[in-house]
Amino acid sequence: MKNLTLLLSFIFSLTLLCSCESDDDDMRAIESRGSFSIDNDTFGLRFGFDTPVQEDSPNLYYKTILLSSEGYVLTQNNQLEGAADVVIMEVYSDQQNFEIEGTYSITDNQAVSGQVEMYFAINYDIQNDTLDREEDIESGTLTITKNENNTYVFTINNGVVDIVGNDFKLNYNGFVTTLN
């Protein structure tokens, strides 16, 4: 439930931030390719967003990253609608002006520099606040690299889903649109 609340607040922030832009056409994310897998179940990813750096506590900062499938639509009223499969990440640093590229240890219990808290949600419907499944990623290593063409590559090694211990894999190659 904690993760659902975080997802709701991120989606709400995403909607508000999108509505504050003067040129709405520039807010659309450029389509990208990727997927995440829980054991043998694979879900596609097409869009990436991140937020500006926010302060978590003194000398600890984070960015929230959302990777989603095609299910969300940005309407003419600048509202996100639909249902999508998503991976949400909060990456932490002790630097106030950090970029997302780097290698992070996945944790579900403590936010410190060099770590990331992650979870996924399947078929999350924004309007009805429903989803089919949600789980924390308990452990593993997330690597984010930035290519010369400003695309990012996200990969996970040894990802394990909370409680049930399923394998979790992430492979995303594409743009991440920063929301102001």
Image (spheres, grey):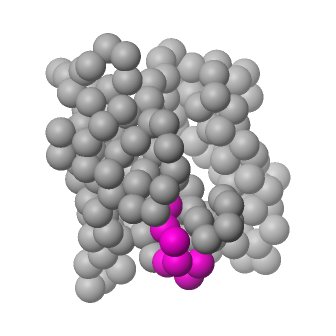
Q: Is residue 2 visible?
A: yes
Residue 81: quadrant of the picture: top right
**Quadrant of image for the C terminus:** bottom right
Q: Is residue 75 visible?
A: no
Task: Reply above or below: 41 against 92.
Answer: above
Residue at 76%, 72% (x, y): give it: 21
**Quadrant of image for the N terminus:** top right
Which is nearer the eye, 38 or 149? 38
Q: Position of residue 108 (x, y in %)?
A: 45, 36
Residue at 79%, 56% (x, y): give it: 16
Residue at 44%, 30% (x, y): give it: 136
Q: How many marks?
A: 0
As drawn, is 40 to the left or to the right of 73?
left
**In this view, which residue lies farthest toward the bottom?**
148
Q: Position of residue 77 (x, y in %)?
A: 81, 52
Q: Position of residue 43 (x, y in %)?
A: 32, 32
Residue 60: quadrant of the picture: bottom right
**In this view, which residue lies farthest toward the front?**
58
- The magenta-colored residue range is 92-98
Residue at 79%, 77% (x, y): give it: 22
Q: Position of residue 95 (x, y in %)?
A: 52, 77
As drawn, is 21 to the left or to the right of 27?
right
Q: Is residue 97 magenta?
A: yes
